[in-house]
Amino acid sequence: MDQAYRDATTKMEEMGVQEEYIIGWQGGYLGHPEREEQNVTEAYEAGYEDGQEKSTDNFANWK
């Protein structure tokens, strides 16, 4: 893991971001395959997309 990943995860946890968003963001950032369709939530999907883009702009939307 790189420092940007660690810093973003710490920031999300400190902000109280929804766990599903954090898990999605981490998976997208690391390039993991997406969850199966029946296990995808709106928060997970948004996090996954932001993680793929390595974006930290939407954290506050998922508190």
Image (spheres, rainbow, N blue to C red):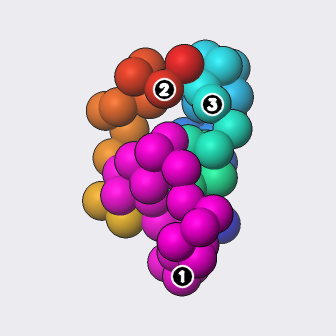
Mark 3 nearby-residue class (10 Å; few <14, some 14–19, many ≥20)? some
Q: Earlier in the sequence, mark 1 or mark 2?
A: 1
Q: Is residue 60 left or right of residue 8?
A: left
Q: Is residue 35 above or below residue 63?
A: below
Residues at discs 1 and 3 in contact (Cβ within 8 Å): no
Q: Amino acid at mark 3?
A: Gln
Q: Secondary structure of the magenta portion, mostly?
A: helix
Q: Which residue is under mark 3?
A: 18
Residues at discs 1 and 2 in contact (Cβ within 8 Å): no
Q: Earlier in the sequence, mark 1 or mark 3?
A: 3
Q: Is residue 1 left or right of residue 21?
A: right
Please give the label number shown on residue 33: 1
Q: Nearer the viewer, residue 58 or 42?
A: 42
Q: Nearer the viewer, residue 3 or 34?
A: 34
Separation (CA) of disc 1 from disc 3: 20 Å
Please give the label number shown on residue 3: none
Q: Amino acid at mark 2?
A: Trp
Mark 1 nearby-residue class (10 Å; few <14, some 14–19, many ≥20)? few
| Residue 19 location, quadrant | top right
| Residue range highlighted in magenta | 26-50
Residue ID at (48%, 26%)? 62
Q: Position of residue 61 (x, y in %)?
A: 39, 22
Residue ID at (48%, 66%)? 28
Q: Is residue 57 above or below residue 6?
A: above
Q: Quadrant of the C terminus?
A: top right
